[in-house]
Amino acid sequence: MRNRYCLGIDTSAYTTSIGIIDEDMNILLDMRETLKVPNGRKGLRQQEAIFQHLTNFPILIDRASKEIDFSKVDTISVSTKPRNNIKSYMPVFVFGKNQGYILSKILDTRYKQFSHQEGHIGAGLISTPNLDEEFISLHISGGTTEFLLVKDLSNNLNIKLVGGSLDISFGQLIDRIGVYLGYEFPCGQKLDAVARYGNRLDIDIPIHVKDKFWTNLSGLENYFINLIETHIYREEDIVFSLFYVIAKIIKNILVNMLNEFGIESVLLTGGVASNSHIRKILMESLSKCGIGLYFPTAELCRDNAIGISYLGKVKDGY
C-alpha cells in the first residue's frame, strides 16, 4: 500500500513527544507536551517525569488519532535509552518503550528501538539530507554536552564519543544561571530573548579546554554567579556573554577536531543548539575556519519524536 507512515515516540526527561512522517519524509504530525517543573526547582525526579508522561501520552494519542489514519502506520519507532551503549539507561524512556511496543502489537506493525541521542541526530538528518556520510555531531542539551564522530551507515548510525564536558552540560550551565537570575526552569528560551538586548562584556572570561576535545563548565557557573553578585553589569549583557563564551568553547573544540580528523561537516543538535545567539556566533566564526555547520530548525533541535520517526523509516534499529 502506498504512503505508509512511521510513528515515533520519545519520552525524555522534560517532553512527551509523538511524531509521524510519511514515505516521502513529509512531517504529518509533530506533537509535544512539555513536562511541568514547579517554580524554583531545577528539574524533575524520574518518577515525577514518568507520572506526567502517563498523563500526557493518552492525550497526544487521542489528538493524533483524530488527524491520522492509524491503519496506515506500518512502523513504530521509539527512543528507549539516552545513548546507544549497553549501560545507558533512564526510567523515563522505559515508559515510552513499553507504550510503543504495546501499540505495535495492537496495530500489527514493525517495532524499532533507537536512542534519544540518535533521535536528535535523525532530526538533523531529515533537515539536511545532503550531509556527508561521516560528520561531527554536537549534542548539546539540558543533560548532555557531547562531541560525536558519526558515520551514517545504510543500516544504522555508527556513533563514537570523542569529546564533550567532563562535568555539567551547557544546558545545565544555562539553566542554573537562569534560575539564579530568577527565571523558571527550563530557562533556555527565556534567556535567549533576554540576550537580544545585550552586548558582550569587555572582560576576559576564562575558558578551559582539556586534551583538545574536552571542557569543564562548573567553574563558569561560579564565575557568572559572581558576575551577577557584583551588581555592576546589566543582566542582558551577562546572559549574552554567557552564550558568547559557550560558542567560543564549541568553536575551539571543533577547530581542534577539524585538525585531528579532517572532517569539515558539523551537525548541531539538542535544545541548546536552538539558541539564536550561539547559532549566529558559530556560523560567523566557523565559516572562516572552513567548517560547514548544519542544524535543524529551532523546533527540531528541541526534544521531539520526528528524528525517531525518520530513523524508523530509513534504519534497521535494534
Image (cartoon, rainbow, N blue to C red):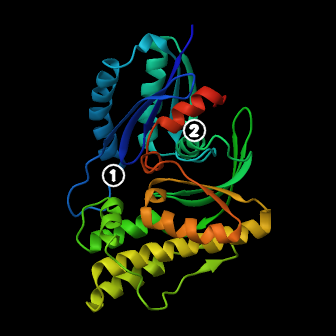
Mark 1 sits on what residue? 45
- Quarter occupied by the C terminus: top right
Task: Give amino acid for label 2.
Answer: Ile
Between 118 and 240, the one lying in front of the other is: 240
At 58% from the left and 81% from the top, the residue drawn is 208
Where is the N terminus found, in terms of image quarters? Answer: top right
Q: Is residue 255 above or below residue 62?
A: below
Q: Position of residue 248 (x, y in %)?
A: 55, 75
- From the viewer's perspective, is 157 left or right of 192? right
Q: Is residue 316 left or right of residue 270?
A: right
Regarding mark 2 in the picture, which secondary structure is present there?
Answer: helix
Q: Is residue 213 visible?
A: no
Say if mark 2 contacts mark 1, CB within 8 Å: no
* Image height of 11 relative to 199, above or below: above
SS of the residue under disc 1:
loop
The residue that mark 2 highlights is 126
Please rate how many residues cluster around mark 1, counting C-alpha atoms within 10 Å: few if below 14, some from 14 to 19, many from 20.
few
- Residue in the foreground of this view, choosing between 311 and 142: 311
